[in-house]
Image (cartoon, helix red, strand yellow):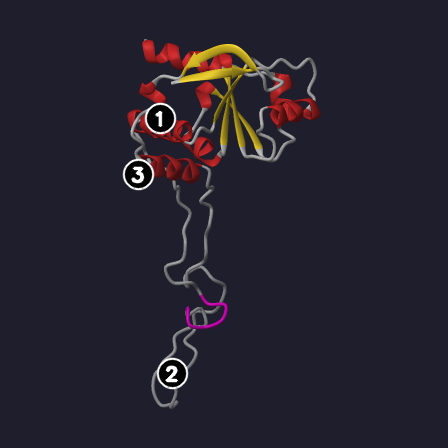
Amino acid sequence: MQVDVLSIKGQKTGRTVELPEEIFGVEPNDHVIYLAVKQFLGANRQGTHKVKTRAEVKGASRKLHRQKGTGGSRKGNIRNPLYKGGGTIFGPKPHGYDIKLNRKVKDIAKMSALSYKAKENAIVVVEDITLNTPKTKEFAGILSSLNVAGKKALVITPEYNDNLYLSLRNMPSVEGALLSDMNTYDLVNAEVLVLTESAAKIFSEEAEA
């Protein structure tokens, strides 16, 4: 699909880039997207939750009263889970939430997410952005010119740009990602993708390779 390249002022430059159908025109696989998002969120969990069992809580191990003859129910020690301050039955233990996904599955998930954005016309290609100094106000003006202001945007660049990334990190609705570090969660979470012209061309080169 052909997409117009816009200037940082939001005007057409007269140039276009080809976003390859092999990446932006596949039939989206919702289940694979779900797995990729689940893996990303799981990998970011600490998994350090822990409660104490009846063997670990503080308290005497003496039986509260004899088994028979009191007229009451049978009771063990004060650490019994039935009592306040007692142990917890089947409580959470520390463990990881990461799941294994093959590289091919991850690639399909990213292509599915990109294809959804292409179908929704939620992809903007802008000429390479050059900022002399980190200026959030200046970068916000660029997004406003691109009609992206106020939307959850993901800005994708081929390489790290100090001034650009320092400018956008003060904007809560805007995220930046290197093309090589792009993940399915960020793609799905964004309302609109802002691709620099260089990043868009790399997609075409990868499809031709």
Q: Quadrant of residue 29?
A: top left
Q: Mark 1 or mark 2: which comes first in sequence?
A: 2
Q: Position of residue 106 (x, y in %)?
A: 34, 28
Q: Which residue is mark 3?
A: 31
Q: Position of residue 65 (x, y in %)?
A: 41, 82
Label 2 to label 3: alpha-carbon separation: 58 Å
Vertical order, 53 against 157 (above or below): below
Q: Which residue is mark 2?
A: 66
Under circle 1, the secondary element is helix
Q: What main secondary structure does the magenta stretch of the protein show?
A: loop
Q: Amino acid at mark 1?
A: Met
Vertical order, 6 against 172 (above or below): above
Q: Position of residue 149 (x, y in %)?
A: 61, 31
Residue for point 39% across, 87% down: 72
User: Does 82 appear in magenta?
Assistant: yes
User: Does 84 appear in magenta?
Assistant: yes
Number of dots carrying numbers: 3
Q: Residues within 10 Å of mark 2 (few under 14, many from 20)?
A: few
Disc ID at residue 111: 1
